[in-house]
Image (spheres, helix red, strand yellow):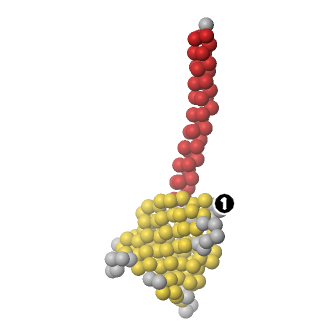
Amino acid sequence: MTTINNYNQVTAMKNTIRTKLYPFLLCLLVSTTYGISQNAQLNWSAESDVVSINGVEAHIASILEKAGDTLTWKQLTNGQTEINTFEINNVSGSWDLPTDSGALNYDLSIEGASSTLELQHSDGEDFSFTITIFGYNPQGDQYAFHINNLTYQ
């Protein structure tokens, strides 16, 4: 009789696990996957008034905008606007909207040249937005932006 009771208890425990734990794990998997794919869909705009080009600071007002599969860098100098448009080929990393923190890496291309954009931010630190363009320079030309404002669209 004890064996039957133990068997019934084990069976009841398995059923409880199946009915309560499996749905929880499924929800956790879906929300994690949604969060990761949401980062790829995240659209934003950032403003900068200083950019370091290969380590040399330049006062160039810039607007960086990510919309869909495109990154646009608008440079505003002497009343003129120069626009560079990058195609986004891949996105990796994660970003937490409520805390404005995380790290995202974009693989880009512009006029046949491969490029990367790295976004990083954590509490107590400045935003770090760095574009590296691999064109004529094999090490890449690096553009590090001093971000004044970041908004989500």
Q: Is residue 136 above or below residue 24?
A: below
Is 88 or 123 nearer to us in this picture?
A: 123
Q: Position of residue 59 (x, y in %)?
A: 55, 88
Q: Quadrant of the C terminus?
A: bottom right
Residue at x 58%, y 68% (from the top left corner): 121
Is 111 or 120 nearer to us in this picture?
A: 120
Amino acid type at image mark 1: Pro
Q: What residue is pinned by disc 1?
A: 98
Q: Position of residue 127 (x, y in %)?
A: 58, 72
Q: Residue furthest bottom?
A: 78
Q: Is residue 36 above or below residue 143?
A: above
Q: Is residue 129 above or below residue 40?
A: below
Q: Is residue 88 visible?
A: yes
Marks counted in the figure total 1
Looking at the image, residue 137 sits to the left or right of residue 46; the answer is left
Looking at the image, residue 11 sits to the left or right of residue 141; the answer is right
Q: Is residue 75 visible?
A: no
Looking at the image, residue 130 sits to the left or right of residue 2; the answer is left
Q: Position of residue 122 (x, y in %)?
A: 60, 66
Q: Residue furthest front?
A: 2
Residue at x 61%, y 59% (from the top left corner): 96
Q: Quadrant of the N terminus?
A: top right
Residue at x 50%, y 83% (from the top left corner): 52
Residue at x 47%, y 59% (from the top left corner): 92
Q: Position of residue 84 (x, y in %)?
A: 46, 78
Looking at the image, residue 16 sits to the left or right of residue 37; the answer is right
